[in-house]
């Protein structure tokens, strides 16, 4: 199925997909019964304008999405808002979107540590394959703006009660100083260098 799907850096022309993207993220969170960091349409639109979002399209049908955020004076970056439309799941699409988002992070912020918070097994598998390792929350950014993103999550009381040391999500981190990118990521970085 994925052979017909293109995975690209989103731009102005993809802003029309933002309502569908946000609705799909919200619906998925309800089904999973998990918490979620809320994002506004304006925020996601801005990500597209800045070339910091990845969209997967099946012809012109929305199939998946992810975007890049930077924190702590660009010392830390994250791939956030990963979503694959239900009917496209379990065919490796999330893996391909994350590879592209990861390569975009490595291209735009080559010295930054890349991190993520997740409660999902699929994302843990994908991250592990990319070279992320599980870490404690103390090893993540202390940028208040990042942690404010957790305020919209239904589990935020746990985070507050433990002084930001523990929560439902697992923290995972890729440190470019201690890891080398895999050949397929290096290839993607080379291609992206011409585009950004
Ligand atoms: C999580 C999500 C993005 C995965 O999308 P997907 O396209 O089905 O994932 P992939 O097919 O690329 O699978 C990646 C890996 O995870 C595994 N996987 C996929 N779904 C899984 C699940 N529900 N439970 C456990 N493992 C799963 C796959 O087997 C694959 O492992 P492998 O590489 O060892 O074969 C998708 O289910 C989704 O959008 N869920 C709702 C939103 C969400 O949870 N986002 C993540 C927030 S952190």
Image: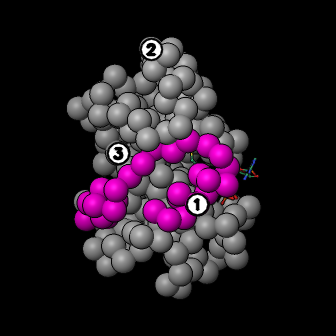
Image coordinates of residue 41 in percent, x first then y, are: 34, 62
Image coordinates of residue 155 in percent, x first then y, are: 55, 32
Label of residue 69 in the image: 3
Secondary structure of the residue carrying numbered label 3: strand
Q: Which residues are magenta?
A: 22-49
Question: Any magenta on residue 135?
Answer: no
Label of residue 163 in the image: 2
Lower sequence index among marks 1 and 2: 1
Ligand 1 contact, mark 3 (Cβ < 8 Å): no
Secondary structure of the residue carrying numbered label 2: loop
Residue topped by disc 1? 27
Q: Is residue 17 visible?
A: yes
**Which residue is at 66% across, 42% downward?**
120
> CA separation, marks 2 and 3?
23 Å
Position of residue 48 relative to residue 119, above or below, is below
Image coordinates of residue 77 in percent, x first then y, are: 37, 39
Image coordinates of residue 74 in percent, x first then y, are: 27, 35
Secondary structure of the residue carrying numbered label 1: helix
- Residue 109 or 58: which is nearer the viewer? 58
Lower sequence index among marks 2 and 3: 3
**Which residue is at 30% across, 56% downward?**
43
Question: Any magenta on residue 25?
Answer: yes
| In the image, farthest residue toward the right | 90
* Label 3: how many Cα within 10 Å (few below 14, some 14–19, many 20+): some
Left/right placement of residue 53 relative to residue 129 reads left
Ligand 1 contact, mark 2 (Cβ < 8 Å): no
Placement of the C terminus among the 4 image quadrants: bottom left
């Amino acid at each position: 199925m994925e052979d017909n799907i293109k995975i690209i850096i989103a731009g102005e022309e993809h802003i029309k997909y933002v309502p569908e993207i946000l609705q799909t993220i919200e619906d998925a969170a309800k089904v999973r019964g998990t918490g979620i960091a809320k994002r506004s349409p304006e925020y996601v639109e801005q990500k597209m304008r800045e070339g910091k979002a990845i969209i997967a399209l099946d012809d012109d049908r929305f199939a998946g999405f992810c975007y890049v955020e930077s924190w702590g004076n660009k010392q830390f970056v994250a791939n956030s808002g990963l979503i694959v439309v239900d009917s496209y799941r379990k065919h490796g699409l999330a893996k391909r979107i994350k590879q592209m988002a990861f390569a975009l992070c490595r291209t735009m912020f080559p010295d930054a540590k890349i991190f993520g918070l997740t409660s999902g097994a699929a994302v843990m598998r994908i991250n592990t394959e990319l070279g992320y390792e599980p870490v404690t929350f103390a090893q993540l950014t202390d940028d208040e703006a990042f942690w404010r993103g957790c305020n919209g999550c239904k589990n935020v009381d746990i985070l507050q009660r433990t002084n930001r040391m523990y929560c439902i999500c697992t923290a995972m981190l890729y440190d470019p100083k201690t890891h080398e990118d895999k050949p397929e990521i290096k290839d993607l970085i080379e291609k992206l260098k011409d585009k950004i």
